């Protein structure tokens, strides 16, 4: 049993098992998440063709306040339309909770894989969301605990509590730092290099891995969605830092994210060689061996196994997408 302090007067609480969380997230592939306003049918109806690993039906930032109530009835039908190509479908809800409850009522239906929870600032908020989801799963005949939570931290306060936030619910699978709101909150202009976000990005990786989640994000803010080369640079750098995927708002971004957050053929081939040579050495009673002038020991082979596991999970998802499209004649 493990405990973590919330960092405030809420005190200590029990955290989910890290191993159990890794078991839930180790085969998760969410290299690309396409965010779109749920109330624009022409976007939603074509979403399944975009190659994204996840489609996020947005009830938050892309919906004006006056239109939020009108947008909610679109969700149930959009879940089925967006999921036709085999991608995971999530709904991004609003804060505060008076809006979030209405969004959940509109979103928890068959076909929903997860809730994208924005602007998280304390673990208690995530735990409240967990309970609200359980109530709706039970009321609608869905397995309790089946709907995931994808967390976005978007403020200095949220970063301060990020470790506790990441550990707050066994439903949580990903953790992201929202760059636009975060830079606004710390009163700086975002830059292409992203140095102003370095602390928050580092905290995202550490907190996510501590909790058994997948860290999501780019190294910098990318407001210009047409800057595909800038996106490629940022996503490639983010992948090397340990991020496993990122969100985008335009279909042209999806292939770049998929490529950047996938191991290359050469990386997978080398990882397999590492595993093979280590297992030969282990069978001979040794725990280290040389390969191409480098020492291969336990940490190195474990990293290689993660690369191979990631490649296999990606292949499984791509096959699922292919079969889904074939089933509808595309």
Image: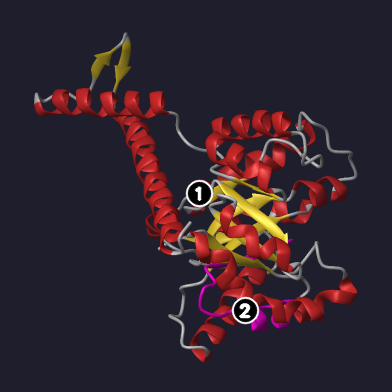
- In what element is the residue under mark 2? helix
Q: How many marks?
A: 2
Residue 42 as seen in the image, left or right of residue 61: left
Observer-nearest residue: 79 or 236? 79
In the rendered view of the protein, which quadrant contains the N terminus?
A: bottom left
In the image, residue 43 lies at what x, y percent? 71, 61
Residue 27 visible in the displayed image: no
Please name the residue that numbered disc 2 is placed on. Answer: 76
In the image, residue 308 lies at what x, y percent? 34, 37
Q: Which residue shows up at 55% across the image and 80% down it? A: 109
Residue 48 as seen in the image, left or right of residue 118: left
Find out whether residue 72 is within the magenta segment. Answer: no
- Which comes sooner in the sequence, label 1 or label 2? 2
In the image, residue 106 lies at what x, y percent? 66, 81
Q: CA distance from mark 1 to mark 2?
A: 35 Å
Is residue 136 shown above or below 81?
Answer: below
Residue 248 visible in the displayed image: yes
Q: Which residue shows up at 71% across the image and 38% down it? A: 199
Residue furthest out toward the front: 329
Is residue 154 shown above or below 301?
Answer: below
Task: Please state the extent of the stretch shown in magenta in the rendering.
Answer: 100-121
Please name the residue that numbered disc 1 is placed on. Answer: 210
């Amino acid at each position: 049993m493990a405990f973590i302090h919330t960092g405030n007067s809420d005190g200590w609480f029990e955290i989910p098992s890290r191993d159990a969380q890794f078991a839930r997230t180790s085969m998760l592939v969410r290299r690309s998440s396409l965010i779109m306003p749920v109330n624009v049918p022409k976007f939603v109806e074509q979403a399944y063709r975009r190659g994204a690993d996840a489609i996020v039906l947005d009830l938050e930032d892309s919906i004006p306040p006056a239109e939020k109530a009108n947008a909610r009835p679109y969700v149930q039908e959009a879940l089925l339309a967006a999921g036709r190509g085999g991608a995971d479908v999530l709904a991004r809800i609003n804060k505060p909770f008076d809006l979030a409850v209405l969004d959940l009522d509109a979103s928890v239906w068959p076909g929903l894989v997860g809730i994208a929870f924005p602007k998280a600032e304390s673990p208690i908020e995530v735990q409240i969301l967990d309970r609200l989801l359980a109530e709706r799963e039970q009321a609608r005949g869905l397995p309790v605990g089946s709907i995931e939570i994808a967390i976005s931290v978007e403020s200095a306060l949220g970063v301060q509590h990020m470790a506790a936030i990441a550990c707050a619910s066994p439903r949580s699978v990903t953790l992201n730092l929202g760059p636009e709101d975060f830079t606004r909150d710390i009163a700086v202009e975002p830059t292409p290099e992203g140095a102003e976000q370095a602390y928050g990005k580092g905290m995202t990786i550490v907190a996510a891995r501590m909790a058994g989640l997948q860290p999501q994000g780019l190294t910098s803010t990318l407001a210009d969605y047409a800057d595909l080369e800038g996106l490629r640079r940022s996503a490639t750098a983010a992948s090397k830092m340990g991020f496993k995927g990122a969100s985008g708002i335009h279909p042209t971004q999806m292939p770049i994210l998929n490529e950047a957050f996938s191991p290359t053929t050469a990386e997978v081939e080398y990882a397999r060689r590492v595993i093979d040579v280590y297992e030969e050495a282990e069978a001979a009673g040794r725990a280290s061996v040389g390969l191409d002038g480098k020492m291969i020991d336990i940490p190195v082979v474990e990293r290689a196994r993660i690369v191979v596991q990631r490649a296999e999970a990606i292949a499984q998802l791509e096959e699922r997408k292919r079969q889904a499209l074939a089933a509808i004649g595309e």
